[in-house]
Image (spheres, rainbow, N blue to C red):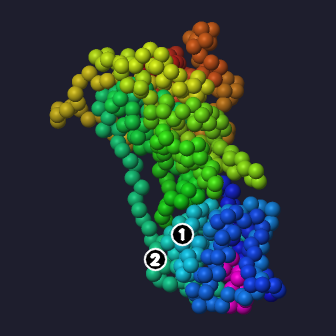
Amino acid sequence: MTASSWSVALSGIEGAMVEVEAALGGGLPRVKVVGLPDASLNEAKERVKAAVVASGYDFPQVLLTINLSPAGLPKHGTHFDLAIAAATLACTAKLPAERVRRFVYLGELSLNGKVRRVRGILPALLAASRAGFEKAVVPAGQVGEAHLVPGLEIWPVSHLGDLQDVVAGRPPRTDLAEEAADGRPQDRGLDLSDVHGHADGRWVMEVAAAGRHHVYLHGSPGVGKTMLAERLPGILPELSPQEAVEVSAIHSLAGVDIGSRLLTRAPYADPHHNCTMASLIGGGREIRPGSISLAHRGVLFLDEAPEFGAKLLDSLRTPLEGGEVTIARANQQVRYPARFQLVLAANPCSCGNAGVVGRECTCLPMQVRRYQERLSGPILDRIDIRHQMLPLKRAFLGEAVETPESSSAVLQRVLEARARQQARLRETPWSTNGEVPGAHLRKHLPLPSDLGPLERALARGSLSHRGLDKVLRLAWTVADLTGRETISPANLRVAMQMRQGEALEAA
């Protein structure tokens, strides 16, 4: 006798439907799983056998073959456990086979039959919905996340024994259904009003937020680089509905509990400098998204950037340009979106005092040079804004000091600038200045009347062709923030100063 159920195989944030077939045959009692399972999936036969027995069912005492179809598609993860158990019970006539086939099953089984949480519920159910399925069985602890997918009837289960009620069409237990009511607030994070002084630095972050530009902050330790970087997400616009689904799917795949609400705030990731390539870019034995994908549509902050090492930093080149990362394995390729804003922060040297007025640097000149060269030219050339943060000249203490602008006030200007960009780029695939290719900048948008400063910088070699495009993008963002329809000479000068790390003048 044969029976089948359905589950989902995930490759990146995309899912493919997998039919889980169970068949009884002659031979010694054992379970054989075929269809390119990985190690964790191949071990499902032991978990399923123990869970079936613990739930009061008899496990078949003959050869049980589990086929995961399509057989040529690599499959990994423990979320197939519930589908394998459902097909097995249907195969042995413990559950009605025809009704079992109507559901998509996601969940890991413990040895006592409990259904445990799994990664990737949201992207898996999105794939099931697109494939035309209408019913899904999920772990009770993730019913809130499952309800984020419209058009699906969600059946939560906490134990394998609950499948009897599910396939019979009985309403789910009230205590399980109520777990969908998760209303955790999503605050906007830290506020720019906490940053006293550093007016230029605050302006730099406003420009970065308005045009989605990458930033390099350098200065002595404790000057406020991290404070500024941490507050950038608070002045970024809320994610669009499509972006919220995409970002939430990535975090679900990484095992983050997103509750019953889509992530609408721009994400923020700040990996430590001793992280591995797999944790930064993605990968590992069981491929997972890395920090650059968790920062998709948000901010990736690399503090003490020179400490990350040249290989890690250079691995960011392709994602910075293409907005995605491809992880290749012998039998598959996995793509994760990675369109993030990069913020680098660095000290001038190992001791942090090189070039700082009033402080003595203990590093040798060659050590200072080697430290600064850890940030390669190709990486720095991909950074739009370079800003040196100087120590404050006064102490901002006491009640008489004027409070800086709040993030909400800056966010309003950012939103107005984004609206101008979207109107100007409405007939293109892009929505912000930081995304616009150089060819479109030069051919389809009006150029400044005086290109002399750009041409002289190119002739001196202080500006590359990529840098020229970045200056034009920055100039458009400065113009958008000042309410102009075209780039003025003042906008262009400010953009060049931001690109070359010079002191800023009024736009």
Q: Over which residues does the magenta segment extend?
A: 83-95
Q: Position of residue 80 (x, y in %)?
A: 66, 71
- Classify residue 235 as left or right of residue 316: left
Identify which residue, 128 or 375, lies in the foreground.
Answer: 375
Residue drawn 74% across and 69% down?
A: 18
Residue 84 is one of the magenta-drawn residues = yes
Q: Position of residue 396 (x, y in %)?
A: 23, 30
Looking at the rendered structure, the kind of residue marked 2 is Glu
Residue drawn 69% across and 51% down?
A: 334
Q: Dot 1, crowdedness within 10 Å: few (<14), some or many (≥20)?
A: many
Q: Dot 2, crowdedness within 10 Å: few (<14), some or many (≥20)?
A: few
Q: Position of residue 121 (x, y in %)?
A: 59, 65
Disc 2 and disc 1 in contact, CB within 8 angstroms: no
Residue 442 is one of the magenta-drawn residues = no
Looking at the image, is 309 positioned above or below residue 472?
below
Asked if residue 297 can be seen in this view, the reply is no
Identify which residue, 119 or 384, lies in the foreground.
Answer: 119
Identify which residue, 376 or 216, lies in the foreground.
Answer: 376
Looking at the image, is 385 positioned above or below residue 144?
above
Residue drawn 67% across and 68% down?
A: 41
- The alpha-carbon separation of the residues under discs 2 and 1 comes to 17 Å
- Most common secondary structure along the magenta stretch: helix
Q: Secondary structure at mark 1?
A: loop
Asked if residue 198 can be seen in this view, the reply is yes
Name the residue that disc number 2 marks. Answer: 178
Please identify the residue farthest to the front as the structure is shown: 28
- Classify residue 431 as left or right of residue 328: left
Going from N to C along the chain, the mark reached first, 2 or 1, is: 1
Tag in front: 2 or 1: 1
Looking at the image, is 317 positioned above or below residue 30?
above
Name the residue that disc number 1 marks. Answer: 117
